[in-house]
């Protein structure tokens, strides 16, 4: 079996993925969560049981060196930007995962091509072992 067409397709897809990764915009890991809170003032609208409270205020949470880091994202423009950055990070992870899978398949295809080439060379009459040089008498 000739693995060359498969290797060409895989190489083409690998190159496409590399180009897509090169075009990734600003990205950041984490999740963005809206939070509502009650201020505790008895005359405030948030004191009623049906009120969700003040907010939303937005929290960006992620893990860094084994610890959870939370950052408050204050403006609505910053919230939209942060959502886009998180989306780009997810896209980067997916593209990276696919690049690793394709690269692994490409490496296997190249090994198959090398194996097939070696078998074809052996069938043409080439010796499988290297020839040994006889030493000259001194």
Image: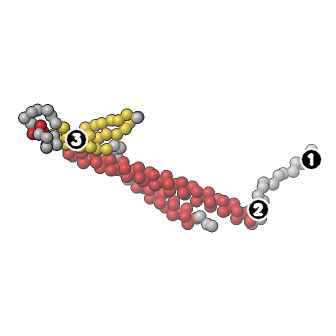
- Quote the CA–CA distance across marks 1 and 3: 91 Å
Q: Position of residue 128 (x, y in %)?
A: 76, 58
Q: Position of residue 49 (x, y in %)?
A: 14, 40
- Please identify the quarter of the rendering in which residue 52 is found: top left
Q: Is residue 60 left or right of residue 131?
A: left
| Residue ID at (45%, 52%) | 97
Which residue is at the far top?
Answer: 41
- Please identify the quarter of the rendering in which residue 7 is found: bottom right
Q: Position of residue 42 (x, y in %)?
A: 9, 33
> In the displayed structure, would residue 102 be above or below residue 66?
below
| Residue ID at (33%, 35%) | 69
Q: Which mark is residue 126?
A: 2
Q: Position of residue 88 (x, y in %)?
A: 34, 50
Q: Nearer the viewer, mark 3 or mark 2?
A: 3
Q: Which residue is mark 3?
A: 35
Instruction: Label 2, secondary structure: give it.
Output: loop
> In the displayed structure, would residue 26 be above or below residue 127?
above
């Amino acid at each position: 079996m000739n693995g060359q067409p498969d290797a060409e397709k895989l190489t083409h897809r690998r190159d496409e993925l590399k180009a897509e990764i090169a075009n990734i915009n600003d990205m950041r890991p984490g999740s963005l969560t809206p939070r509502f809170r009650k201020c505790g003032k008895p005359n405030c609208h948030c004191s009623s049981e049906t009120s969700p409270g003040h907010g939303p205020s937005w929290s960006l949470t992620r893990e860094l060196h084994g610890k959870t880091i939370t950052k408050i994202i204050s403006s609505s423009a910053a919230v939209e930007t942060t959502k886009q950055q998180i989306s780009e990070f997810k896209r980067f992870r997916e593209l990276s995962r696919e690049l690793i899978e394709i690269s692994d398949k490409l490496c296997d295809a190249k090994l198959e091509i090398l194996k097939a080439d070696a078998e074809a060379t052996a069938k043409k009459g080439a010796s499988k072992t290297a020839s040994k040089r006889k030493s000259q008498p001194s």
